[in-house]
């Protein structure tokens, strides 16, 4: 399968209100400055802690976005999550794993306005790249072991 010469992500962070539309890969090379900006964009909004996000996860998100057209902005619900925020969500009774892959920067919860979450779930599963979860408000993808829920 031929990969695009450029990889761009167009995202909106629902917690911070920030948007980013950035080329992070071109001519076979990842742009470290762009990746730093993406890592900051996907930081834990609760603590402002930044962690490197797995580039395989970014590539998967980019591949999913390209299926629906790069003009569509991805709404990020959760990228990196600090231990403090993860425990806070658990204390609220949210169905959040104690060892969530969000803590490692290898998971993202997102939606694409105008695209049904079941359709997103189906497309994400088709890549066979890691875990994919379907929720009413969003789809979860990660680069952990392959599993679906």
Image (cartoon, rainbow, N blue to C red):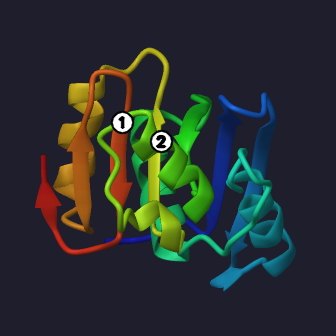
- Residue 48 in picture, x, y percent from top left: 80, 55
Farthest residue, direction right: 33
Q: Nearer the viewer, residue 92 or 137?
A: 92
Picture layout, residue 124 above or below residue 93: below
Sequence-wise, the earlier of marks 2 and 1 is 2
Picture layout, residue 89 above or below residue 125: above
- Residue 51 in picture, x, y percent from top left: 68, 72
Q: Which mark is residue 53?
A: none
Corner quadrant of residue 144: bottom left
Crowd around label 1: few <14 · some 14–19 · many ≥20 (10 Å): few
| Label 1 sits on residue | 94
Q: Nearer the viewer, residue 101 or 1?
A: 101
- Residue 139 in picture, x, y percent from top left: 34, 38
Q: Are marks 2 and 1 in contact (CB under 8 Å)?
A: yes
Farthest residue, direction bottom: 29
Name the residue at 61% across, 58% down: 84
Q: Secondary structure at mark 2?
A: helix
Please state if 101 lies on the left or on the right of 7 as rendered.
left
Please state if 11 lies on the left or on the right of 115 as rendered.
right
Q: Which mark is residue 89?
A: 2
Farthest residue, direction top: 114
Name the residue at 42% across, 61% down: 60
Residue 59 visible in the current orientation: no
Name the residue at 31% across, 71% down: 1
């Amino acid at each position: 399968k031929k990969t695009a010469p450029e990889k761009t992500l167009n995202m909106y962070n629902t917690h911070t209100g920030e948007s980013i539309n950035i080329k992070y890969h071109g001519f076979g090379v990842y742009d470290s400055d762009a990746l730093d900006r993406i890592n900051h964009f996907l930081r834990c909004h609760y603590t402002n802690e930044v962690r490197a996000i797995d580039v395989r996860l970014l590539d998967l998100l980019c591949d999913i976005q390209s299926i629906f057209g790069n003009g569509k902005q991805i709404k990020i619900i959760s990228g990196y999550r600090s231990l403090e925020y993860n425990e806070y969500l658990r204390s609220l009774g949210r169905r959040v794993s104690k060892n969530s892959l969000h803590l490692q920067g290898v998971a993202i919860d997102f939606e694409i306005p105008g695209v049904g979450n079941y359709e997103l779930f189906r497309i994400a599963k088709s890549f066979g790249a890691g875990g994919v979860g379907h929720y009413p408000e969003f789809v979860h993808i990660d680069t952990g072991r392959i599993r679906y829920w």
